[in-house]
Image (cartoon, grey):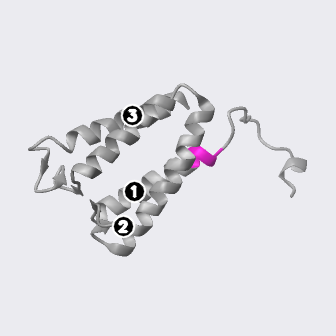
Amino acid sequence: MKKITNLFGIIFVAVGILGFIPGITSDGYLLGIFEVNALHNIIHLATGIIALMVAGSHSKSKAFFKIFGVVYGLVTVVGFLHGHSVFGLIGVNVADNLLHLVITVVALVLGFGGSKHSSSMPMSGNQMQM
């Protein structure tokens, strides 16, 4: 979990920084695809920094992904419903919404998925019964 949380944090910090670099972001589009603005970039930076801060703890990483997954899920739904803006604060487009959906699913799986002590052993017939 530590490596995944660190990687997640590094990616989000990088995306936040790249969003401020002219040439990589032009006319409000990161890489010409994803709609961003200053607040959107700051949110990416903050999210990445928080991920890096909690990466050393399995339980904090799980909690981060649970909270982040739920919040991003809400952002995704609002983005799809309102099209070009999330609460009038951050601009989004279809590419953003689809990426947010993928990130939401990944975060929720990481946050709510198996435990630290889960076994890779197959379940016996008795364990599979509900």
Please tell me whether the stretch drawn in magenta is mainly helix, strand or loop: helix
- Asked if disc 3 and disc 2 are in contact, CB closer than 8 Å, the reply is no
Q: Which of marks 1 and 3 is nearer the N terminus?
A: 3
User: CA separation, marks 1 and 3?
Assistant: 18 Å
Q: Mark 1 points at which residue?
A: 100
Q: Name the residue under label 3.
A: 49
The location of residue 55, given as percent across then percent down, is 50, 29
Q: Specify start and end residues of the magenta stretch as a single range.
A: 109-113
Task: Look at 42% across and 61% down and name the residue there.
Answer: 75
- Asked if disc 2 and disc 1 are in contact, CB closer than 8 Å, the reply is yes
Callout 2 amino acid = Gly
- Asked if disc 1 and disc 3 are in contact, CB closer than 8 Å, the reply is no
Q: In this view, does 8 lie above or below 74?
A: above
The location of residue 76, given as percent across then percent down, is 42, 63
Q: What element carries label 3?
A: helix
Q: Is residue 73 above or below residue 31?
A: below
